[in-house]
Amino acid sequence: LSPTAMGRQVEEAQQWHSAARDAATVIQSKEAQMQLVTDYCRQIQTAKDTVERLTMKSPEHSSSKEAEQLCSLQKSMEENGTILGELLMTSTQLSPHLSWSERAATQAEQKNLHEKWRGLERLVERLLHSA
């Protein structure tokens, strides 16, 4: 039995404890990042599905008969507008954890989706004004 040997064992155990604590922190961080990725994927798919569904509801031209349908479509777009905001918030949180190429891909995907959404809004406005 040696106090010096026991002291080394204590130091070694403290280093292992420190490494385990660091590993636990990394695991928690990666789990949080995984949740952000999961949320982002779910939100982007929901947004795409919503844009597609709303686009399918939009009439090709306007008439007084379709004015009610256009008003309903416009209301649906307003109600679903938060989807893009939620997506932006999640993307902002996720962005620091992405590589440059992943960041560029998510930005392009969001830009494309945003442009489709805005195009649909303009179409509905135009058709409503001509109805």
Image: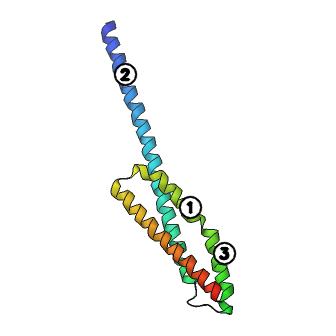
Cα separation between marks 3 and 2: 63 Å
Task: Decide which of 95, 5 is in the foreground and name it.
Answer: 95
**Label 1 secondary element:** helix
Q: Which quarter shows the N terminus?
A: top left
Above or below residue 85? Residue 49 is below
- Amino acid residing under circle 3: Lys
**Label 2 secondary element:** helix
- Residue 45 position, x and y percent, is 49, 67
- Residue 113 position, x and y percent, is 48, 70
Cα separation between marks 1 and 2: 48 Å
Residue at 52% across / 77% down in the picture? Answer: 119
Above or below residue 23? Residue 17 is above
Above or below residue 25? Residue 131 is below
Left or right of 100 on screen, residue 123: right
According to the picture, the residue beneath numbered tag 1 turns out to be 85
Disc ID at residue 97 = none
Reading the chain from its start, which is encountered first: label 3 or label 1?
Answer: 3
Reading the chain from its start, which is encountered first: label 1 or label 2?
Answer: 2
User: Can you see residue 35?
Assistant: no
According to the picture, the residue beneath numbered tag 3 turns out to be 75
Residue at 37% across / 30% down in the picture? Answer: 19
The quarter of the displayed image where residue 6 is located: top left
The quarter of the displayed image where residue 70 is located: bottom right
Callout 3–callout 1 Cβ contact below 8 Å: no
Callout 1–callout 2 Cβ contact below 8 Å: no
- Colouring rule applied to residues: rainbow
According to the picture, the residue beneath numbered tag 2 turns out to be 13
- Amino acid residing under circle 2: Ala
User: Can you see residue 92?
Assistant: yes
